[in-house]
Amino acid sequence: MNEERRPNPDRPDTPLYTPVVFDEERDAPRGRRLPEDLDLTGLDDLDDAPRGGDRRRPGGGRGGDGDGRPPRRVRGPGEGDSGLLKILGVVVLLGLVIVAIVLPGSPFRLIGRTSSASAGEGVSAKALDKVPAVPNGFEALSKLYEINVPEGAKGPWTIEVALTKPTTDGTNLGFYSYDSGRWTRIATVAPVKDGKSAAGDVGSAPGSIAVLRRSGVARQLGLIIDAGQIPDGRGVAGANVIAVMAATPAAAGDAGGLTVTAGVIGNVAKAAGAAKVYLGVSPGNDAQAAIRAIGSSPAHVDAIATLAKRENASGVFLDYETVPAGQRDAFTAFVKSLRDRLQREQLGLIVGVPAAAGANGGAYDWAALTGSADALWLRATPDAATYYEQMETLLGARRDAGADLSKVTLIVDRRSQERVGTTQKLITLRDALTAASAIDRSVEATAAAGATVTLKAQNLGDTSPVLKWDNTARTVTFSYSAPDGQHSLWLENRFSAAFRLDLASRFNLGGVAVAQAQQDDALPDVWAPVTAFVQDGTVQLTRPFGPYLAPCWQTAGGSVEGAACWSADTVPAQRAWRAPAEPGVYDVKLVVSDGTAFVAQQIALRVGGASATPTATPATGVGTA
């Protein structure tokens, strides 16, 4: 990894707001997200990360998904089973003063969310007489405002700017700041007031601000979903192609035939906006299916084209990733034949190529395939520990061999990875954090008043950081031992996704395709970095706030001894709980985080009275930072 692309160490400050746990059985407060870490690197181009740091909470400063909603709540596995531990969302109570400031003499409005109304006072803005020249491919839709923020005034803020060129089209709109001849993207914005203004969320006030629109996207964006799923609306807004994996080669004996989930293309098309919907064809669970299909090429080509036309697809995504190297020429000929057939139907073709085929491409002749397909979608290596080593070797070799990498799109999977022994599997972020937050239930069933009880995490160590940032995998990771072997987990979130986008940027790939792009709250929200990359070509490389990776013990009574939560990154997973003097049953919670989502499990301990086994309650939800 180039040193200039490496993020600086974690920021040293403590969280601005202390998370509190809410119980779904009671009315949950309207949430506010925890502060995101600072932007820690600057890039070289027009679209460098903001010099002041875009400190927006992910999805916006409104404390939710960017649309004013509270943080999404994720159901835990087996919810309703009283034998499972309780998973609770960790959010921040809103309890804050909303300060709306209409700055005198300018069509500029700032809405601050702060603990004090006075914190928003003294903010001023001045419109410049002339907007500096914007880069090629951009258009200024507002004046440029210089903003003065007094010391002590803290965000986040929602800023609303009047447009000199009104628009109701929010495509490729953004807040940009200007400093020393350089424009820097700050945040995504949306039209408000019938297109007369644009509004967006920032975590800290920039020195200047204007609304610019990029006339075209910097990269292509693809979404990949399974049949029966609906794509996440936050991804649809910027997507060019949505591939629905709905077809597989038929069983042996049906030469060239296909098995398909009918009607799903039309269902997705209703939610696709301007994106084209492609029929995805893959071998499914039959590793020999692709080989059989290629062997019956004329019939299989006709079956694919006929099916795509019947389902009203705009094209085909052919994802045959199990073709052996010996079938290289046959596969190339098959793709060319399919391209010719689809062109007669005015349909597009995208071909999936697996990184697992190796640096020479195996059965996948990149040069020949880019000549036949509209694009190649590269399915990355499944091993997080060697991801960058293998992917950089592969892309470097393909580039040196003359492949047109601008026609290659990198597939980024939203799922986390777990290795047990030599077996790799993909899991959700929720499942990974559920494993991390498990409590060792072998603690004492009953404690005397004032006694000390040792609390232990079931799957986390007793000393040192137990969830940590892995500089090689460029993601949060943790490991634990279990009866079935050693478990190693790599957690996919917006931080790790940004590094994958940076890989695509460094090799000048044509775009990114998000796998598992369906609406699913168990998967991480990666849409902010993805949107910035495809619309503006920007990538902000950041790491999680270190102390958030430390486990946090919370209690409804008594006290947990040791350092305060999120004040240091060396809090052990084993802590001492001192029972209160008053007899009763007390909830103790273990909260863990990957830096974006906070998940807690709780156990009930009895102080005094009759003996009772520690109890647990069903799963409820997840909060996000």
Image (spheres, helix red, strand yellow):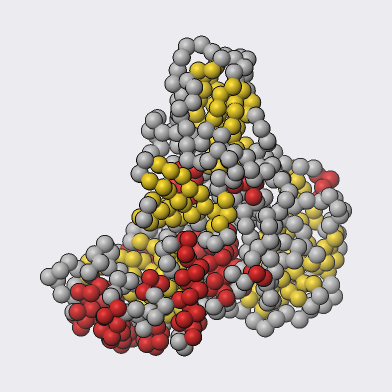
Q: Residue furthest left?
A: 253
Viewer-proximal residue among 81 and 147? 81
Give the x, y percent position of residue 545: 65, 51
Q: Say which quarter of the image contains residue 588.
A: top right
Number of labels in the image equals 0
Side of 363 where 26 appears, left or right: right
Side of 270 where 308 appears, left or right: left
Viewer-proximal residue among 259 and 265? 259
Answer above or below: position of 574 versus 339.
above
Q: Residue furthest top?
A: 609
Side of 201 where 218 appears, left or right: left
Q: Which image quarter is the N terminus in? A: bottom right
Q: Residue at x 44, y 21 (%)?
A: 613
Residue 534 visible here? no
Viewer-proximal residue among 120 and 350? 350
Residue 103 visible here? yes
Give the x, y percent position of residue 142: 74, 71
Give the x, y percent position of residue 582: 61, 14
Give the x, y percent position of residue 244: 36, 66
Q: Residue at x 43, y 43 (%)?
A: 481
Q: Residue at x 33, y 74 (%)?
A: 318
Q: Residue at x 85, y 75 (%)?
A: 129
Viewer-proximal residue among 415 and 195? 415
Answer above or below: position of 204 versus 332.
above
